[in-house]
Amino acid sequence: MDWYVKVLKQYFDFSGRARRKEYWMFGLISAVISILLTLLDMGVGLYSDVYGAGVLSSIYSLAIMIPSIAVSVRRLHDTDHSGWWLLLIFIPLLGVLILLVVMCFNSKDDNEYGPNPKTVPNPDSPDNLTL
């Protein structure tokens, strides 16, 4: 959950780099929340079969749209690609597959977007939290 909160704290931060773990944990937690909100929408009667979405899940999707784009851009920076690569999403099927593969790449060494986040000790990182 700490990785999810970390992305939300960097709401409009399109600079820097994001590790694979940060990107994929945010995606996983967001998907789980979306599914739960959709089920809640269906249970309460706020789900529309015509639109294929519910009120609560739609509001949540809009709320996390900017952080999702920001963490995607930072993840592309971590693989030494420009954030403009995110526009590949508009190429049907092939663009999504290319982005999926690139998002799975390992972090590159220090590059123009900053130092490798795996080698820089960050006291605020969820990996450094003690229980």
Image (cartoon, rainbow, N blue to C red):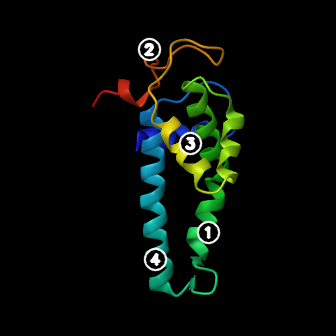
Residue kind at label 4, given as amino acid type: Leu
**Where does label 4 land, which residue?**
40
Q: Judging from the image, what secondary structure is the residue with disc 2 in?
A: loop
- Whether the residues at callouts 2 and 1 have beta carbons within 8 Å, the answer is no
Q: Is residue 84 above or below residue 27?
A: above
**Residue mark closest to the camera, 4 vs 1:** 1
Q: How many marks?
A: 4
**Where does label 3 land, which residue?**
99
Q: Is residue 108 left or right of residue 13?
A: left
Residue 35 point in image, percent of width and height: 44, 67
Q: Is residue 127 above or below residue 35?
A: above
Residue kind at label 2, given as amino acid type: Pro
Q: Which mark is residue 109?
A: none
Q: Which mark is residue 58?
A: 1
Please report whichever mark, 2 or 4, sits nearer to the chain's N-terminal start: 4
Q: Judging from the image, what secondary structure is the residue with disc 1 in?
A: helix
C-alpha separation, residue under disc 3 versus residue under disc 4: 31 Å
Taking depth in this image into account, of 27 and 81 the one nearest to the observer is 81
Q: Which mark is residue 121?
A: 2
